Amino acid sequence: MTSYSDQVLYMGLAGAPGERFVVPTRLVYEAHDPFAVRFVFHPDSDHSVQWVMARDLIAQGLSRPSGQGDVRIWPTVGCHSKSSRVCHSGW
């Protein structure tokens, strides 16, 4: 059984209206914390930032709007692959 999964991808992040950034992001799953997924933005830099999200929230957000409070996830409309939008409003 795999106890660790690590996948690097590029996420599009939105800043102020009209600002978009492409950020290298590492998604990490570890068996010792089976209900969480870590998002590590700029994983190979001295200024990396980590978010930890519930695995179930991410899975639900692929098919329907999910979450409440600071973090919400919803499916991307018109995409042919499984993708979602993530909103973190707790800045």
Image (tube, grey):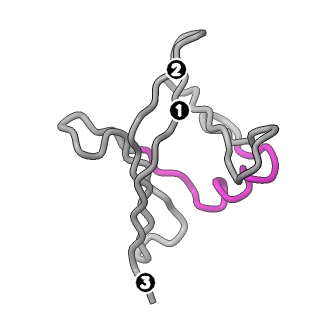
Instruction: Assess disc 2: are there few (<14), some (14-19) or many (≥20) residues with their C-alpha within 10 Å of its C-alpha.
Output: few
Residue most extreme to the left:
46
Q: Secondary structure at mark 1?
A: strand
Residue at mark 3 to residue at mark 2: CA–CA distance: 35 Å
Please say if 81 is above or below 87: below
User: Is residue 62 within the magenta segment?
Assistant: yes
> Which residue does the numbered mark 2 point to in the structure image?
20
Q: Identify residue type, mark 1.
A: Gly
Whether the residues at callouts 2 and 1 have beta carbons within 8 Å, the answer is yes
- Say which of 90 and 12 sits in front: 12
Residue visible at 52% across and 20% down? 20
Kindly identify the amino acid type of the residue bearing the numbered disc 2.
Answer: Arg
* 14 versus 62 height, above or below: above
Amino acid tagged 3: Thr
Q: Would you say 3 lies left or right of 73 here?
A: left
Disc 3 residue crowd, few under 14, some 14–19, many 20+, Cα 10 Å: few
* Residue to which mark 3 is pinned: 2
Numbered mark located on residue 12 in the image: 1
Coordinates of residue 82 in the picture (x, y in percent):
70, 53
Disc 3 is placed on an element classified as loop
Front disc: 1 or 3: 1
> Residue 86: within the magenta?
no
Near-viewer residue (84 or 72): 84
Query: Extreme front residue here?
Result: 80
Region in magenta: 51-67
Local packing at callout 1 (Cα closer than 10 Å; few below 14, some 14-19, many 20+) is few
- Residue 12: x and y in percent read 53, 32
Q: Are marks 3 and 2 in contact (CB under 8 Å)?
A: no
